[in-house]
Amino acid sequence: MSREASPAADTEDVLLSFLDNDGAVVEAKRRFTTASFLAFVRTQEATRRDQQAPRWVWDDTASFYPNLLAADVRVQRCYDLRLSHTILRNSSLTRKSALAVAEPGVWDASPAAARVIRETGTALFDLQVELAPAPDPAAEFACQLAAVASSSEPRRIRLLLAAESAGALVAAEMRFAGLPWNTAAHEDLLARELGPRVPYGVRPDRLEQLAGTIRTLLGEATLNPDSQQDLLKALQNAGLQYGGLPLLSTQQWHLTEIDHPVIAPLLQYRKLSRLLSANGWSWLDAWIVEGRFHAEYLPGGVVTGRWAARGGGALQLPKQVRGAVVADPGWTFVVADAAQLEPRILAALSSDLAMARAGHGTDLYEGIVASGVVETRAHAKVAMLGAMYGATTGESGRLLPRLARAYPRALGLTEDAARAGERGDIVTTRLGRSSPRPSQAWMDAQAQAYAQSASNADERRARSQARDWGRFTRNFVVQGSAAEWALCWMAEIRKQLWLLEDETLAGFGRSPAAGRGRGLFGDAPHLVFFLHDEVIVHTPIALAGEVAAVVTGAAAAVGKLLFGTFPVDFPLTVATVQNYADAK
């Protein structure tokens, strides 16, 4: 691939490589301007629908796709080389591939300048367009396809790569569209909770009042309640104890069990302080643009495959501020979240029919109670969380044996995953994402525990580290598989919303191509928020019923896609609301 300068400032000669019917490479130069390239992509998308839509293969969706969206060009499918490389590099399903055993290279580094390849049909690629200097995407794509082909389970890993890439498209589109945000409502909330707006670094009136109360109750006239070291010292000086011993922590779960007049104002101070720092006036100024919160999501940002976010706290929107998330006039939100997603994923992963039946058509925790395993829903929840996260003490530890007797396959899967981690082995999710191996320091500590010179301290340290890593792998396989379910769910929602938009536009006598013009999401339902097992679709009110059906149907379809005929339910709680705060 190559590009040559052209006398026209906005024109480039791009070397295109085609595969003919015999598989031979045919090369030709074609001149693209930015406008003509965008028109080319738009035309390809408009003339090829459903499964015939082109799959655009590029370095990094987050780098490339926003440029298309800004030009009112949206694509149906893509293949993200950067995200796929990470999965194939680490998956146990592709561990023998050339890609997996190669020395680290440019594809293991941070995203480079974006370039694009277009793939259609069954050929490796039939058109590639180099837009900027970057690692060779054609060679990398060929290497990735070879890794998939040699995989022990190609179908699983292909589905994961497709889901991860679709998730990257969703993330870029949600950032572009933005979550509707009512600035006036947010400012009213801040004024109500904190008092009048103050300059950055100045403590608002309500916080200053609480700080004064705390100082008076502790007898510390100059105390800064934001300093945890000073606060702990003041609490100790005031004689506060936890469990009959001097207080050693200012953590909330310690403070809530102490009977002292300062606790209530101190906890209120912390709540409002978090509001100020996480979603106060500075946050409002930085993140809300023209009535939209444009969060930057990071697909695959967590090692389990869960998403992360870069600034703005998109994955931690507290209930306090959800009242500012207000649909546009004539629009509404369809808010859906999957009930007890991770326990249901565990039941399906382990093929535990008893656990699946407990959740059939009902709340899973209530079903566990109805089965006679534990007495209350709270008991069922704490026991299940203990099974998935490795809690062995307290109420969870007491209830786990009962859960294990009732659901041996499910609890056996989590135990096997924990034992693998304790040995330093990896575990793998439903579709093929594998956990990292522990660090060399961890390995050295384990080896030292078996050395002839090992001390009791060496052995205790090794056991503790092994248990910690076992808890990580125990949860990895469940959380990672749940993240895959959520990715596939969003991909299916996005696909069905696209088809719904086509039908709606056709009903108004407009072609789908015309409807995807100015504004992209100006008249179409679209995803605007995602949080692990919850989505929000912003939709014209007239389409709310169809959107709710899409979201619900997508959950059922994805359950079958991942787990076939195994009888596990993935029920949703679905609400149609004007204000996000009213969803729960």
Image (cartoon, grey):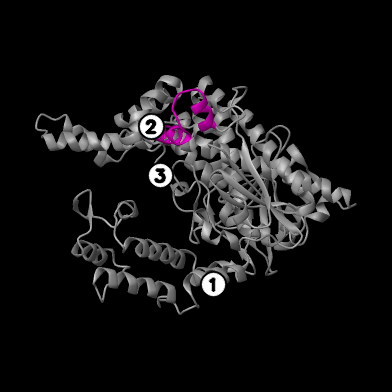
Mark 3 or mark 1: which comes first in sequence? 3
Residue position for label 2? 426
- Residue 18 visible in image: no
Q: Amino acid at mark 3?
A: Pro
Dot 3 and dot 1 residues touching (CB under 8 Å): no
Q: Viewer-proximal residue, 109 or 125?
A: 109
Q: Amino acid at mark 1?
A: Asp
Give the secondary structure at mark 1.
helix
User: In the rendering, which numbered label is found on residue 468?
Assistant: none
Q: Is residue 272 magenta?
A: no
Mark 1 or 2, closer to the camera: 1
Q: Viewer-proximal residue, 130 or 15?
A: 130
- In the image, 572: left or right of 54? left
Residue position for label 1? 285
Q: Residues within 10 Å of mark 2 (few under 14, many from 20)?
A: many
Give the secondary structure at mark 2.
loop
Q: Residues within 10 Å of mark 1 (few under 14, many from 20)?
A: few
Give the Cα separation between the discs numbered 3 and 2.
20 Å
- In the image, 201: left or right of 235? right
Residue 371 coordinates in the image, percent (x, y): 50, 23
Residue position for label 3? 104
Please state the extent of the stretch shown in magenta in the rendering. 364-388
Residue 268 coordinates in the image, percent (x, y): 40, 63
Mark 3 or mark 2: which comes first in sequence? 3
User: Based on the displayed image, in which of its 4 quarters is residue 54 positioned?
Assistant: top right
